[in-house]
Image (cartoon, grey):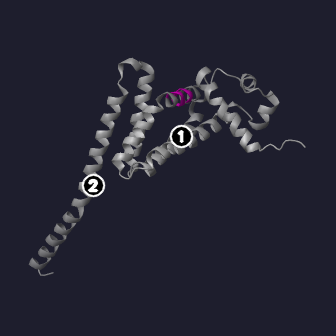
Amino acid sequence: MPKIVDHDVYRDELALKCFDLFAGKGYTAVTMREIAWELKVSTGTLYHYFPNKMAILEQVFYLTAQRDVADGVSRVEKFITPADRLKAFLEWVADLELHFADVLLITIDYHRQEGHDAGGLVASVVATYTDAVSFYVLPDRELSALVMTYLIGLITERIIIRENIDFTSKVDTLYRFVLKSLENKAQETLATPVKTVKKARKTTKKGKETGE
């Protein structure tokens, strides 16, 4: 009896195996023939599942982001407060720094080759991570986007001048800044009704004085 192949699952397996290949040799450097050889499949099989190299990378990014989000959620969901969740999230990022460095290197290499055509895919991937941070870690989309921007910059800096950058201290600075921002926003929210009431009282008093 012939073996039944789930083509969607097999396609995902092929794509995920390409992550290390793209990270090690570079997206630009490898050809479809080399990818097929590394995956131990024929070029015909590879083209059956992916029309070109960009299609492979799109699936690599999509699957990697989904897997990372699931892993990250498992690390933070047991905590209740945003402060504890943020701490757990940043510790998770620190543990996987080399992985995220590979993601960035692949992204930069891809963008260098594809140019403006790469923008949409890259923005979509970043949005996937940002949405997860906003939903599971911080109840603030603006701060979540800021955290992502900071971490992308920090990991990029570590790639370039690793020995001179203390990842732990930089992440701690981010942690304290975000907590302070959350505190300030909470105070502003509490103060808003008071200001509204005072303004309403002044308006009422002025109306009485003018006979309105």
Quadrant assignment, res 155? top left
Which of label 2 and label 1 is nearer to you? 1
Q: Earlier in the sequence, mark 2 or mark 1?
A: 1
In the rendered image, residue 74, in percent from the top left (x then y), is placed at 49, 46
Position of the N terminus, as image quadrant, is top right
Mark linked to residue 124: none
Q: Residues within 10 Å of mark 1 (few under 14, many from 20)?
A: some
Along the line of sight, the residue nearer the viewer: 145 or 118: 145
Q: Secondary structure at mark 2?
A: helix
Quadrant assignment, res 146? top left
The magenta-colored residue range is 101-106
Judging by the rendered image, the residue that carries numbered circle 1 is 68
Query: In the image, is 45 to the left or to the right of 121?
Result: right
Along the line of sight, the residue nearer the viewer: 71 or 119: 71
Query: Type of residue at label 2?
Result: Ala
Judging by the rendered image, the residue that carries numbered circle 2 is 186
